[in-house]
Image: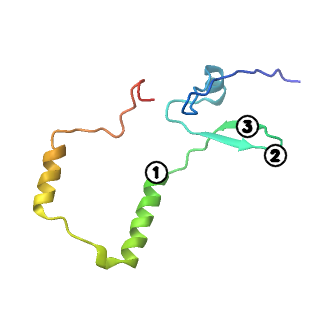
Amino acid sequence: MPATLEVESTLTDRYQTTVPETVRRALRLSKRDKIHYTIRSGGEVVLTRAEVPEAEEDPALGQFLDFLSRDIARHPERLQTIDASLAERLQWLVGGCEVDLDAPLSADDE
């Protein structure tokens, strides 16, 4: 019978936890990888590495774009143009900000 290794981690006040190193190694997890949970009827939870789809899409963005598409189709009369003064004001508010959405979070942000 194969040996069983048991490890523990603690939940934070926000229900977050760090995946223990032994589990990360066993599942070959890296930062930004996804974890899949299988919850069995007896209360047992099996944790595995999630399969990465061919073209990884952001599910929240996809759902939002679907919502916009349906709303525009149902109510085209609600569409409004953005006038030049609003566009200039928006540019003034964020003009000096550079954001790299692909940059990893700092340790404080994770």
Indicate left or right for 64 with 20 as reference: left
Residue at x 56%, y 39% (from the top left corner): 34
Using a 10 Å C-alpha cutoff, classify the residue at mark 2 as few (fewer than 14 neighbours), some (14 to 19) or many (20 or more).
Answer: few
Image quadrant for the C terminus? top left
- The CA span between labels 1 and 2 is 30 Å
Image quadrant for the N terminus? top right
Q: Is residue 107 above or below residue 92?
A: above
Image spot of residue 27 (x, y percent): 64, 30
- Determine whether the residue tagged by mark 3 lies in a helix, strand or loop: strand
Image spot of residue 3 (x, y percent): 82, 20
Image spot of residue 77 (x, y percent): 29, 79
Residue to which mark 3 is pinned: 46
Tell me the quarter of the picture where residue 47 sits: top right
Residue to which mark 2 is pinned: 41
- Residue farthest to the right, as pictured: 1
Q: Is residue 92 above or below residue 2?
A: below
